[in-house]
Image: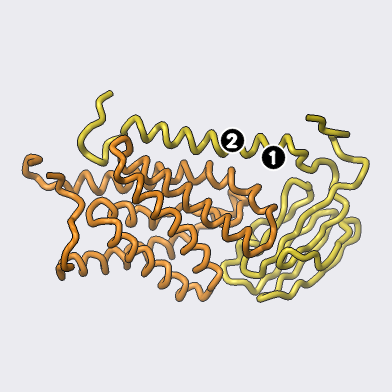
Amino acid sequence: MKDPKDVFTFRRGDAVAAVLVVLTALCMIFVQLLGGAPSGQAGTAKVFRDGEPVMSIPLQKDGEYSVEGAFRNVITVKDGQIAITESTCPGGDCLRIGWISHPSRSIVCLPNRVEIRLEADPGTEALDAVVW
Amino acid sequence: MPWYGKGRGVMKTKDLTLMAILTALALVLSLVERMIPLEMLIPLPGVKLGLANTVTLFAIYWLNVPSASIILLARCLLAALFSGSLTELAFSLAGGTLSMLIMAAARRSKHLSVYGVSVLGAAGHNSGQIMTAVLFMHSVHILSYLPYLLLIGTACGLATGTAAAGVLRVMRPKQPAA
């Protein structure tokens, strides 16, 4: 196909660019999965603020916790799941993520610099070891 | 001579007015876009449709990269004023800068049309935002979101490119190309 003169018609290079980006993304996911992404049941949630761990929350007990940073996040644990249920941050993206219980997922509040990560119970991981 | 891409020189009032209108348009698009709860469907931090980039793309071709950059900067500042969030501003500027650098280079390639520029711009925007998030959160863990954002971004980039292409096609002057 000859590349047309106008800018608003699809060119072969566009498809190449799109495919390249998609491939790069897929490679990144592949590498992540290989590198031993966590699996298994989550037993504990670790809350980080500014990259520093500030609290460790067991998921077996229902409860409410508060994290203060630039804004305030209220974290609720219920039925083995965890979510940010209240937040004074603008935007409120963190509220919309909802409940998580699997270690592959995390909740992030960017304005408050807060991250909730789940850790699997030792012994329940699906992979025993990854050998290269 | 292509009918798009005005050269340098003293800015005409006409161009200034056009830039102001485009800024307002981009601002409205970015505000409206925030009302769509995309995070419900796709739980990624910072996921968005990028509707305002249609304006940026149009400006890159109809005007030039410096003008488009001014519009982008003004739009980000105003949007941050409206939302009252400085972190939002930081992320927009970071993503926007990387995106604009990539689009400026991509625009010059004869292998890429507005579709390709849009896709690469979207990829740059997401990358810039994630890198800033890594710095802010002091956590490399955030990088794990990047590939998923890139995938969504490519799709949205194609959509945005289609919109911009449509506008550019309609705006083509009726006289035969010189």
Q: Residue at x 35, y 47 (%)?
A: B105
**Which residue, as the protein is rendered here, is positioned at the far right?**
A123
Tell me if B171 is positioned left or right of B131 in this view: left
Using the image, name the chain to which the residue with label 2 belongs. Answer: A
* Chain coloured yellow in the rendered structure: A
Total tally of numbered discs in the picture = 2
Amino acid at dot 2: Leu
Closer-to-camera residue (B21/A12) = A12
* Chain coloured orange in the rendered structure: B
Tell me if B29 is positioned left or right of A43 in this view: left
Disc 2: which residue: A26
Quarter of the image with the N terminus of chain A is: top left
Q: Residues within 10 Å of mark 2 (few under 14, many from 20)?
A: some
Quarter of the image with the C terminus of chain A is: top right
Q: Residues within 10 Å of mark 1 (few under 14, many from 20)?
A: few
Q: CA distance from mark 2 to mark 1?
A: 10 Å
Q: Residue at x 30, y 56 (%)?
A: B65
Disc 1: which residue: A32
B60 w.r.t. B23: above or below: above
Closer-to-camera residue (A43/B109) = B109
Tell me if A38 is positioned left or right of B113 in this view: right
| Residue B111, horizontal then vertical, whole percent | 31, 35
Q: Secondary structure at mark 2?
A: helix
